[in-house]
Image (cartoon, coloured by chain):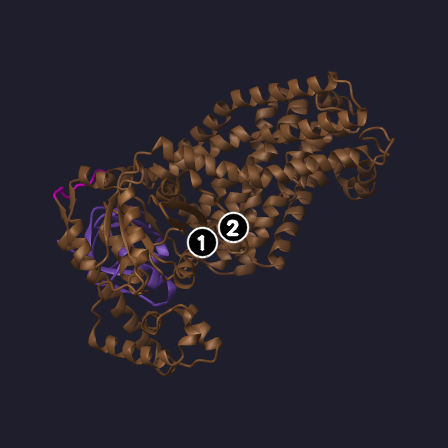
Amino acid sequence: MVPLSLLKTGDKVVVRSICGTGHLAKTLGQLGIIIGIELTIIQKAKESVIIRIGESRYALGPGAASMVLVEPQI
Amino acid sequence: MGKTTLFNSLCGVHQHTGNYPGVTVDIKEGNRQINDHSLIVSDLPGTYSLSAFTPDEQVARDALLTSNPDAVVQIIDATNIERNLFLTTQMMEIGIPMIIALNMSDLADEQGITIDAECLEKNLKIPVVRIVARTGEGIDTLVENIIRVTGQKTRATHKEIEYPHSVTNYIGEIGNYLSSHASLLGKLSPHYAAIRLMEGDEHLEKMLHDQGLVIPFIDKSDPAERDGIAEDILLARYRTAEEITTCAVKCTMGQVLPADLIDQVLTHRFYGIPIFLACMWFAFQVTFSASNPFLVGIEYIFGYFTELMNEVEMDPFIQSFLSDGVIGGVGSVFVFVPSIFVMFLLLSILEDTGYLARAAFVMDRLMHSIGLHGRSFIPFLIGFGCNVPAIMATRTLQSKADRIITIITIPFMSCAARLPVYVLFAGVFFGAAAGNVIFFLYVLGIFVAIVTALIFRRLVFKDEPSPFIMELPPYRKPSGFAAATHMWHKGREYLKRAGIVIFGGVLLVWALATLPAGVEYGSVDSLAGIIGQALHPVFAPLEFNWQLVVGLIFGFIAKEVVVGSLGTLYGGEEMLESSLAADPTLSPIIALAFMVFVLLYLPCVAALGVIRQEMGNWKWTGIAIGWGIFMAYIFAYLVLHIGSLFIGV
């Protein structure tokens, strides 16, 4: 498992864990970033990422991206 | 997506929009008469969930939970159903009859997405209507459905979400407990209130707690257990949304999406910022060159009216009131209308295409390094047009600290109203270098904003800006009609808000410059002169003469009034330029210090009202005002004294 902030553009990953609780974790949950979901990284700028889940795209800053622990898919 | 467009076509010509004062975000209301049914339609702020972390989402939630509507129409983007169904799963439990308007089904067809609306309807037990809000397709069917659904007198029964056993037990238990205290719940059903409590609705929990209701489970259990249950509920909702989507939506397209490629270019870590700057440069160029012809036309028309007025024989007092007061006043308002309209048009086009959200992502890193949130950047951008909507746009920020810092810094973005002051003074005192001087003022504003943000973040709030999370809307071809409508609404709002204030302000200046009766217009003996003289010593270190001081006082009404009031004080707007140039108490460097002061000192009355409204208290409003005056004084002083070294007095 690695944080989302350490992957590269084009990677397909599965979310395995969300660190922490509170508003931020809840916000991620409301956006559909939940355990078991598959997502694609479509942009990586320093530690910020843009991800795609199905047809939805989300931009996550460094703080949010490092909270999402994922497992790369082959 | 398409909410306001649908609202407009629903309410058509009968639409009257009213802003609810006191609440943070506008809920627009309109009505439509169909046969003997009269519908009252409310346009709520857009949201993807009822969890409400930001003020605009809170308004949407409160409207749904407390205003007891007869029906709710959820607009679902047909190209992205699963995402929208999450909100459906939250809303259908409230018990309000729902209708789903499947918007942009034409676009979904283009993208190869086939939607089985009947299957959707059957599974959700909610009527589904296909519409294209842009063209008005399907609106009639939607209205029929609304009338049918609102006629039902029983509580709506939609699909029930299947929660795990443990969760269902808890909900049942808490629901039973709440049934005996139903009066405390307002419009909520005990069952739904129980679900919201389990989901972690702190707002509701606090409300019940304040009324002395202690819920056994919630008080005793440990936070981890509650988080677990909240997560189970979340997952159950997603599972429901996913199941329904899988059954109703067939996607025939491949995996490579062009939008991914566009995103990769526009948000690139190296090209992202240059692309953004190029867009902004282009937008500013268009704003100024496109509005120029209108500007010249408006000036011509008002000049013509003034002349006409002066030729007619009448009482000189009334003549002065009409030509200096009314026409001069209205004219000074109208001159800015074209650039503000063009600005709003461009912003709404940029927003429509989906680019603005990408720009916020690109700017996040930069904003973060000065202690601001990436989202603050959009209010800043709007601030160059007008600070009032910019301050309102801070509602999309989650953390209070982020919001306060952004609101304090927005007034340093040089709004369109300040431009006439620069144009006048830079033109008179700097000649060919006027353009550079004006550019310097914009940059200085941004510099002061950065300093302010750093100081408040480091010394006052001492925490990091809240992490950046933002949904990026799909790219769309901007519709000229939608952008024009948007521009019209925003522009009209500005005109209404600012127009009355500015117009009133100019009349006030006129009155102060004329009274007491018999004095020479705008002379030292007039009320304006007396006020200017009294405050003059305060500005002595800045070497402003009393006319400038009066201008500043009236500039509080609206910054463009500075020009108008100097016009009246110097005896007519036509001669203002030559009078200023000939005034021995002025010099280029004093003019520059004055422009710096005008840039920074005070937001106008309209902006101040919005700051008070968004801050929610006078303490932070006061700090925002005090800080502005402090910055203005310091920087004007620095400019005066450092500048003198270069230019010589």
Residue behind mark 2: B406
- At numbered mark 1, what does the secondary structure look like: helix, strand or loop? loop
Disc 1 residue crowd, few under 14, some 14–19, many 20+, Cα 10 Å: many
> In the rendering, which numbered label is found on residue B292?
none
Side (left or right) of B130 relative to B644: left
Q: What shade does chain A have? A: purple
**Residue receiving disc 1:** B397
**Residue B248 position in % (x across, y down):** 15, 52
Q: Who's the residue at 40% across and 62% down the image? A: B68
**Secondary structure beneath disc 2?**
helix
Give the letter of the brown chain.
B
Q: Residues within 10 Å of mark 2 (few under 14, many from 20)?
A: many
Mark yes or no: residue B303 visible: yes
Quadrant assignment for the N terminus of chain B: top left
Near-viewer residue (B421 or B491):
B491
Q: Tell us which disc is closer to us: 2 or 1.
A: 1
Amino acid of disc 2 = Thr
Q: Is residue B256 magenta?
A: yes
- State the residue in front, B242 or B544: B242
SS majority, magenta: loop
Query: Which residue is drawn at the image coordinates 27% and 65% (left, top)?
Result: B234
The amino acid type of the residue labelled 1 equals Leu
Residue B494 at x, y = what percent?
54, 39
Image vertical order of residue A9 relative to residue B295, above or below: below
Q: Which residues are magenta?
A: B252-258
